[in-house]
Amino acid sequence: MTVTETAAGRGGIQAIARAASVLRALKNQRAGLSLAQIAARTGMPRSTVQRIAGALAAERLVIAAGPEGGLRLGPELHALAEAGQVDMVEITRPYLDKLSAETGETVDLAMPGGGGLVFIGKIPGTQRLRAVSSVGDVFPMTTTANGKACLALMANAEVEAIAKAEWKSRGGRRRGIEKFMAEIRAIRKSGVAYDEDEHTEGISAVGAAFHGADGGIYAVSVPAPTARFARSRAKLTGAILRARDEITAALAPARRRP
């Protein structure tokens, strides 16, 4: 290998490392960041960030955050991430099956993505009348039990940004941010979140979130018709907390790997 080839290889590795730094800076930044903000977070010159961002945008790994500018992670990156979720679905399936068998209700597995909460796994319940959703559906985060459970694992600033952006996109503020943040704090203490006729009239749910082996946030939820949910609330809450703890324990060895 010549000196020129060695230098070219090092340059390629550096370019990859810099691109990864830009993508990491945009992680969880649903409202996006400006080039100047990315430069400040990565320690790179703005001109370098602009050049890297252009290359990433050409591959749809980043896209414009909105008409006012800025960048956020793009659909191609989300597609790649979702393609890697098969293992998480398979890892959690025995626990989701057990939870559904114990409660007789539908059990969903979801994660933040696609501008909301993406359903990536589902175990249908045995009840004749049950909640209906499909893998691939994207639900709001602020009005769903699993969405609120995911938000409770995020930093306050990110929660507020997501909530405000979601309320704005839906045509106005659903509630005061102070009241919503108080609910998030309560979820952090109890470990469970509830949706009682918030997202869909006549359907209520309980949800609990956890960190996956990949560091991502996931949530298990049990939806049911509101009348039946009210009668089974305590049972469903206990069952979902046990399932969350069992999943977390099963994932612990994977998270400890170097």
Image (cartoon, rainbow, N blue to C red):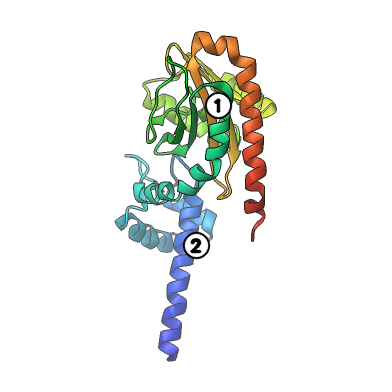
Task: Residue at 45% x, 40% y: name it.
Answer: 30
Q: Is mark 1 on a helix, strand or loop?
A: helix
Q: Which of 152 and 158 is in front in this view?
A: 152
Asked which quadrant contains residue 211, the reply is: top right
Read off the residue under disc 1.
Answer: 101
Residue sitting farthest toward the right: 189
Q: Position of residue 48 (x, y in %)?
A: 42, 64
Q: Residue 87: x percent and y percent? A: 49, 48
Amino acid beneath label 1 = Ala
Indicate whether 137 appears above or below 73: above
- Kindly indicate the quadrant of the structure image that contains residue 190: top right
In space, the residues marked 1 and 2 are separated at their CA atoms by 53 Å
- The reply to whether residue 48 is in sight is yes
- Compared to residue 43, the image places residue 236 above or below, namely above
Q: Can you see residue 150? A: no
Q: Which residue is drawn at 59% across and 14% down?
A: 232
Q: How many marks?
A: 2
> Residue 199's spot in the image, x, y percent?
44, 19
Mark 1 packing: few (<14 Cα in 10 Å), some, or many (20+)?
some
In the picture, the quarter occupied by the N terminus is: bottom left
Q: Residues within 10 Å of mark 2 (few under 14, many from 20)?
A: some
Contact between labelled residues 2 and 1, with CB atoms less than 8 Å apart: no
Q: Name the residue under label 2.
A: 44
Q: Which residue is drawn at 57% across and 10% down?
A: 230
Point out the frontmost of discs 1 and 2.
1
Q: Is mark 2 on a helix, strand or loop?
A: loop
Residue 101, x across and y down, in percent: 55, 26
Q: What amino acid does circle 2 point to? A: Met
The numbered mark at residue 12 is none
Left/right placement of residue 228 relative to residue 120 reads right
Residue most extreme to the bottom: 2
